[in-house]
Image: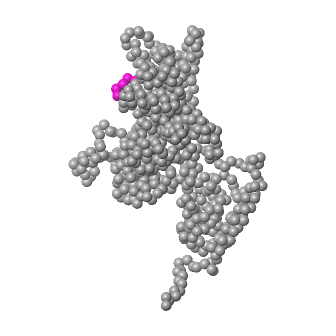
Amino acid sequence: FDAGANLREMAMEGPYRPTALIGENRFIYPTDDLPMVGVCCSTDNREATYLASVTRRGQLNDHLAIASGQRIDDHKVRKKVIDFLIKARPAAVLIGTSGGFSSRFLSRRLGELIVKATEKWNNREIQGVDEDDEEFESRRMEYGYNDDEYEQWKCNVELIDDSVPQLFGRSVRSKKEFPEKEVNLKCAIAIARQGKDPLSELTYAWNVASDVGIFGTEMFYLNIHPLQRLLPKNRLLRQYERVLCEAVADVGVDINCACSYDHLLGSLSFVSGMGPRKAANLKQNFARLGGAIAKRIDILKKRYLGPVVYNNAVAFLRIREIEQLPNQDLHPLDNTRLHPDVYHRQVWAVKIAIDALERVENNNKDEENFKMESLKIVMENSKEEVERLFNATKMEWEQHYGPTFNVAGWDPRNNVPSHMWKDKVEELDLDAFARMIENSGQGKWDSHLQMIKWEFRLPYEDPRKPMAPLNGDKLFRLIAGESDSTLRKGIIRTGKVIKNGEYGSRVKLEGDISAFIPLRYLADKHVVSSDEIVNVGQVVTAVITEVKKEHFTVDMSMRMEDIKKLPSTWERPLSLLPLDEDYFDMGAAQRIEQEKQAKRDALIDRQNENVGTPSTRPKPGRQQRRACAHPA
């Protein structure tokens, strides 16, 4: 299904990467869990606009409401927003596009306030000229100054697609998690979570059963494909489920975070061998036994999962450093894609690490520490090798082509030849080791050994590319609510004249889209002033001659020769599917075009009556008065 491919594209969109990390490669400096602020811009005059700050794990930290009657340009509102941003200090402020042009306006204003907030925080150690010592200390305490915080705070604002967060704000899930919060606040929380992990938000949407016990029915409310309503729902759900299972298998799941936070539990349902009910049971066992899972092997030993489910699922479950595991010496391979069979039962990974370091295995009581130390040294060596190769590749490129190296696009798997690797594990002949294992009758392990090598280098690297900033057609569609099928050359639209200028008339179309009618296109004859043809406040009908998506505006024409042109004569956008003569009914299209032509001619006649001629229309600026009859 194309719908499955579209969902795959949504699921494999990575976390938002702030501009502070744009100059760094994601394999060297991963995006990691960052604090975010989500903004839901209200489209209803009775509702407020909300800013929601979430923690690194996606929990609500604080929020700020901007009432519908208040403007962000107001001095008091600006001060509240700046203080809120300084208190939250997010890595990025993400604004949902559901507010349309209001979201675009808000992003510009928030960008200005972020500059002021970051400047104010980064200069917190500088005492003002008119500020005495007591006021200086008071300001430092107000900002929560910490002597250990020397890093500069960097933040940026970005517009993101909030179709999934809007679904959360109006769902049963949000009522259960935030029973007393406003809808826009819940949407703002979900927008921040969307920026942190889009895949978790999709799986969270799936993880709710309908009244008849079917999971995933919320997905039908997402516009994943324009023809999705024509497909059988059961087949569509199966395809969606398959896509999400594949995405979760590629990315992996932090089992401790998934069992600790409801909004992250959905990913656990798509782990191989699991499901919504097994995931819920695992969470119950997690809460019953208390604490956190420190080792993968504990999942089986403490009976969180049965042996069959454990064997199928464990390679997709990650054990990472979190708050619940302070000062724990975690097994380095528990945060890789390697199955415990290759480092607990068969110990191939451990043997590779020890041989790479040319160490000799000892069988004393410190054997486990010896193995762990060997693994950490080899993995650290491979990590340093990845960084060395990146710097070497960048330096060589810039010597030949200047500072044009694609930092974000560099991938050590694809951009580094095998002969350039100089880490410890590359010195080993793994092919010979695999043949030796096979000759001993223990099976074929070649693919596993190669996987061990790459997991040493890139342990559980995220295959998803960072969330790309919105631009072009997608940004225009999300902000304006229009696409090439609804707004293109040759379409006739009606709007209200809002301004007459020297070079033409400004028109506001439905949906707040700005349009411009150049002076020469106001009429078929020569026009000296736009006031001769239209007045401010007058409703006019014109044909679109050009769509300028980058400026969110269109050019239009009121000339009869343009309005009378048949739709088929206008240039067809490349984004629309070409007309296939084997399937497209040209005869029916011509009949429809003739009917529209008749309606168009009638519209032109009404427009001529409405516009009139300069001799019959009142002169601009003059007020007409009518006689009032005496009441007597």
Quadrant (top left/top right/bottom left/bottom right) for the N terminus: top right
Residue located at (39% from left, 30% from top): 287
Residue located at (52% from left, 88% from top): 629
- Expressed as whole percent of the image width and height from the top left, the position of residue 300 reads 45, 21
Q: Is residue 77 left or right of residue 222?
A: left
Residue located at (46% from left, 35% from top): 265
Residue located at (27% from left, 45% from top): 140
Q: Is residue 119 visible?
A: no
Q: Is-magenta flag for residue 326?
A: yes
Q: Is-magenta flag for residue 396?
A: no
Q: Is residue 60 visible?
A: yes
First to last magenta residue range: 325-330
- Expressed as whole percent of the image width and height from the top left, the position of residue 256 reads 42, 30
In this rendering, is residue 117 above or below 406? below
- Expressed as whole percent of the image width and height from the top left, the position of residue 378 reads 45, 20
Q: In terms of depth relative to the viewer, which is nearer, 603 or 79?
A: 603
Q: Is residue 401 left or right of residue 335?
A: right
Q: In terms of depth relative to the viewer, which is nearer, 329 or 285?
A: 285
In this rendering, is residue 330 above or below 89? above
Residue found at the very far front of the displayed protein: 212
- Expressed as whole percent of the image width and height from the top left, the position of residue 583 reads 75, 47
Q: In terms of depth relative to the viewer, which is nearer, 69 or 374?
A: 69
In this rendering, is residue 595 above or below 25? below
Q: Quadrant of residue 55?
A: top left
In this rendering, is residue 592 above or below 471? below
